Image (spheres, helix red, strand yellow):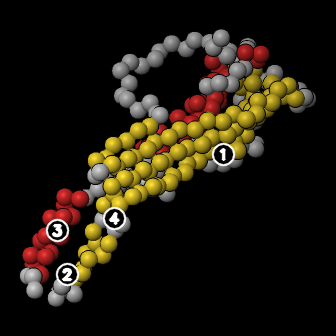
Amino acid sequence: MRNPVSVFGALLSLLCLTACNTPWMTNTQRSAIEQYLISTTVDRCFSYTNYMNYSNKKAFMDYTYFSPQVDKQYVQGIIEARLSSFGVVIVKKQEEADIIVQPLCGVLGTDHDKIMIGIPSLPIPVPDTGLSFAIPEIPLFSKVTRQAYGKFSVYIFEAKNRKPLEAIEGIRSSAKYVNWIVFLIPFKTHDLEMDDSVEGRTSFDFAP
């Protein structure tokens, strides 16, 4: 019968050699990756909206039906910055406005899924000791995908009588971050701009 100490040492060595890189995910206090996914999705959604018809108009922002969520203020800032890039002036009082802009958020959240081919995590008892420890999963192939989705609408009314002027619907976008493990080698792919900035943008040109 093998020495329990030798068995434990062998298993510990195997554990060190086969430890895998599992991405950390949170459900409450969000990781930087999740924040990147959300903010990128919001940026992409509103980068295609066109407000040239309302250039030099004064706009009152009506967020009455904008669902409360953690990212609400960021979305509001992006919408108002996009309007301003077309020369729309944001005002605080409805009586000062020419138009009312009413954004709606249908979807803004993240999802994740995982595919793994390999050995799952297993509890290993140490003979003659009553002790046990768990070997982590050993993936030959693993793919963990985290993706954000956004869906918005923007409705524009005349300020005096709320006569509908335009409905911009079906504003949709997404962003993706994927952790891979192939034969114990981890790497990642994504469609996010995550490189450090080398130069800050100081100009504010009106969109065409």
Note whether residue 52 is visible. yes
Q: Nearer the viewer, mark 4 or mark 1?
A: 4
Pick whichever of labels 4 and 1 is earlier in the sequence. Answer: 1
Residue type, numbered disc 3: Leu
Instruction: Tally the marks.
Output: 4
The numbered disc on residue 126 is 2
Pick whichever of labels 3 and 4 is earlier in the sequence. Answer: 3
Query: Is label 3 in contact with label 2 (beta carbons under 8 Å)?
Result: no
Q: Nearer the viewer, mark 3 or mark 4?
A: 4
At x 51% / y 12%, what residue is drawn? 203
In this picture, residue 123 sits left or right of residue 56: left
Q: Secondary structure at mark 3?
A: helix
Q: CA distance from mark 3 to mark 4?
A: 16 Å
Residue type, numbered disc 2: Val
Q: CA distance from mark 4 to mark 1?
A: 36 Å
At x 63% / y 18%, what residue is drawn? 85
Residue 97 picture location, percent across and down:
79, 24
The numbered disc on residue 119 is 4
